[in-house]
Image: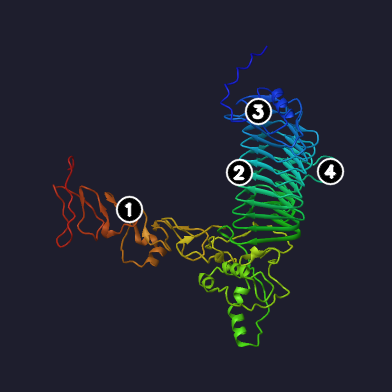
């Protein structure tokens, strides 16, 4: 027989109101018998094998927590871990949740008309559901949150490799990592959706998180049918699909290495998708079309700034208004004076409210114009025209922003588009408005494709022309300093015969001007004949000769009338 496991470590003092559970049976009894909120502490390193789901059906809050290395709840690939109903809320903190398996939904938690579900500071591994929600299934329930947690190698046979939520509270991934999770099509289903999350009629929030290595037929990372999605400061390495919803990606969100049938990075089938503030779709592929973006329907827009080294055609989102046409001179003058202010006021009336005027003034990017914007005097704005450059009537926050509205065409290039090699760029919107970006790099500088700025050429290389994508090594035996537009000095172990030589002629005929350093001399890069370094124990007649002589007396001197180059003989010299 196998040896008995060592006893568990002594439990630390319980938090006020907490109770201990030393076994799976104890945990089950405390939850299923609870009539009020309960907080349960599991010993660190404890391993509870679950025989079936633990059920909570009362309107209470249950917290199951551990500390240190945490306790493990193991479904053994045979059962899910928890089932919730009756508005019961569940918080799992500091745990390892493994091998939960559901015949239908929720490999860890299955929630029907339940309360909130939180998985905090925990690791979820190898959990699955044959149909929906590999980790969590929530229907008409509260919010679902993964906070500072990791979910890996989880799977759903139909939709939502990690989370499936419908008609529930917001789904949040905050500071979490989801990797190698998938929604795999089972027989009888047209498609498998949402490798990480699938949301319908509820909101999705992804912040400071990473979703990688996930896959699905539609939406390798995220599939949203309806609701609003917001992704900020997150890295996503699969696909996003939207149908009849609204998606917002901002604050440096990165979508990379994605693949799909169409729309490798983003697939829009309806609704509104807003990209902004450094969001980047890069390195994605599609079997059919739209390696980066495919828009079947709906609106997809990008509000600059883009990442440094990227550009998009754009126009300022503003209210297009009819021409000023007042017969009274004072009104006409006021209308013309405030025409640009009116362009940033969301009101369609001739006189915006005080709040609308203040908002319009704040949208002015020019400080002088913002200071001159007077909300107390009448503006006499004109009515908005029929054609508008952006949908400011629905989202007034777009006013004043540099906006690109994508046409209903597939995008195969990385998005936003990369500035070509040899161009300067920055995170400033003015450098991102056309394919010339910030203009060509200066001589002595270069940039690679999508570089944030030009970089100086290293010593020994040069660029003679503007707009170069790489620096050119100096021809033998020439050298250069950093940020050089040519090579006009000699490299190490060579010297320049005449420092007055024309630099262009030195470059064209380097071997005529650069000569090998004579024995017993020292020639660093940039050495010329007149400053040739002479080793101790040797001398030359003048700084116009490269002929060196060995000293045969205690001191060596140059010739009369020239600066003396004295060399004292060292011990052992002849």
From the top left corner, tell me how far across and down residue 138 is, in percent. Answer: 75, 41
Q: Is residue 143 above or below residue 407?
A: above
User: Mark 4 against mark 1, which lies toward the viewer?
Assistant: 4
Depth check: give the residue in front, 299 or 219: 299
For disc 4, the marked residue is 189
Which image quadrant is residue 456 in? bottom left
For disc 1, the marked residue is 524
Circle nearer the N terminus (4, 2): 2
Residue sitting at x 53%, y 73%:
369
Direction from residue 63 to residue 55 in the image, left or right: right
Disc 1/disc 3 C-alpha distance (Å):
66 Å
For disc 3, the marked residue is 72
Direction from residue 469 to residue 343 in the image, left or right: right
User: Mark 1 against mark 2, which lies toward the viewer?
Assistant: 2
Residue sitting at x 65%, y 72%:
352
Disc 1/disc 2 C-alpha distance (Å):
54 Å
Direction from residue 246 to residue 551 in the image, left or right: left
For disc 2, the marked residue is 175
Contact (Cβ within 8 Å) of mark 4 with mark 3? no
Circle nearer the N terminus (4, 3): 3
Query: How many discs mark residues in the rendered view?
Result: 4
From the top left corner, tell me how far across and down residue 422 is, in percent. Answer: 53, 62
Q: Secondary structure at mark 4?
A: loop
Residue sitting at x 55%, y 73%:
373
């Amino acid at each position: 027989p196998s040896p008995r496991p060592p006893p568990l470590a002594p439990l630390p003092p319980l938090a006020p109101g907490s109770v201990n559970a030393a076994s799976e049976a104890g945990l089950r009894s405390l939850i299923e018998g609870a009539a009020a909120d309960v907080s349960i502490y599991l010993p660190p390193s404890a391993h509870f094998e679950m025989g079936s789901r633990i059920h909570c059906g009362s309107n209470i809050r249950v917290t199951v927590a551990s500390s240190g290395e945490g306790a493990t709840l193991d479904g053994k690939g045979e059962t899910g871990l928890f089932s919730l109903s009756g508005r019961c809320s569940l918080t799992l903190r500091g745990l390892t949740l493994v091998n939960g398996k559901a015949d239908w939904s929720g490999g860890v938690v299955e929630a029907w008309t339940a309360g909130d579900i939180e998985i905090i500071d925990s690791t979820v591994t190898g959990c699955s559901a044959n149909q929906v929600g590999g980790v969590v299934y929530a229907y008409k329930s509260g919010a679902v949150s993964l906070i500072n947690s990791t979910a890996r190698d989880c799977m759903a046979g139909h939709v939502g490799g990690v989370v499936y939520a419908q008609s529930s509270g917001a789904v949040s991934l905050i500071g979490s990592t989801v990797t190698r999770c998938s929604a795999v099509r089972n027989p009888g289903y047209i498609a498998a959706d949402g490798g990480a999350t699938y949301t319908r009629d509820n909101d999705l929030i992804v912040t400071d998180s990473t979703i990688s290595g996930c896959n699905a037929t539609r939406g390798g990372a995220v599939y949203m049918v309806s609701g609003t999605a917001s992704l900020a400061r997150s890295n996503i390495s699969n696909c996003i699909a939207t149908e009849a919803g609204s998606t917002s990606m901002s604050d440096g969100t990165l979508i990379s290495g994605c693949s799909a049938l169409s729309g490798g990075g983003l697939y829009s089938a309806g609704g509104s998708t807003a990209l902004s503030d450094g969001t980047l779709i890069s390195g994605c592929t599609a079997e059919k079309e739209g390696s980066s973006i495919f828009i079947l329907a709906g609106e997809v827009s990008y509000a600059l700034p883009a990442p440094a080294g990227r550009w998009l055609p754009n126009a300022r989102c503003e209210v297009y208004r009819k021409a000023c046409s007042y017969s009274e001179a004072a009104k006409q003058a006021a209308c013309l004076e405030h025409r640009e202010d009116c362009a940033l006021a969301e009101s369609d009336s001739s006189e915006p409210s005080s709040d609308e005027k203040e908002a319009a003034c704040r949208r002015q990017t020019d400080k002088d114009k913002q200071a001159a914007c007077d909300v107390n005097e009448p503006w006499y704005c004109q009515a908005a025209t029929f054609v508008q450059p952006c949908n400011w009537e629905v989202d007034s926050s777009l006013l004043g922003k540099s906006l690109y509205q994508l046409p209903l065409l597939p995008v195969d290039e990385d998005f936003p588009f990369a500035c070509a090699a040899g161009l300067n760029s920055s995170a400033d919107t003015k450098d991102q408005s056309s394919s010339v970006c910030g203009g060509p790099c200066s001589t002595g500088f270069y940039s690679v494709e999508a570089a944030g700025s030009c970089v100086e050429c290293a010593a020994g290389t040069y660029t003679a022309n503007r707009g170069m994508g790489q620096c050119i090594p100096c021809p033998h035996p020439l050298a250069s300093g950093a940020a050089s537009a040519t090579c006009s000095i000699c490299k190490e172990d060579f010297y320049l015969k005449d420092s007055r030589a024309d630099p262009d002629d030195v470059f064209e005929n380097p071997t005529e001007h650069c000569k090998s350093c004579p024995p017993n001399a020292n020639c660093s890069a940039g050495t010329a004949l007149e400053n040739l370094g002479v080793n101790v124990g040797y001398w030359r007649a003048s700084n116009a000769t490269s002929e060196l002589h060995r000293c045969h007396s205690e001191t060596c001197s140059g010739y009369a009338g020239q600066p003396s180059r004295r060399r004292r003989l060292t011990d052992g010299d002849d």
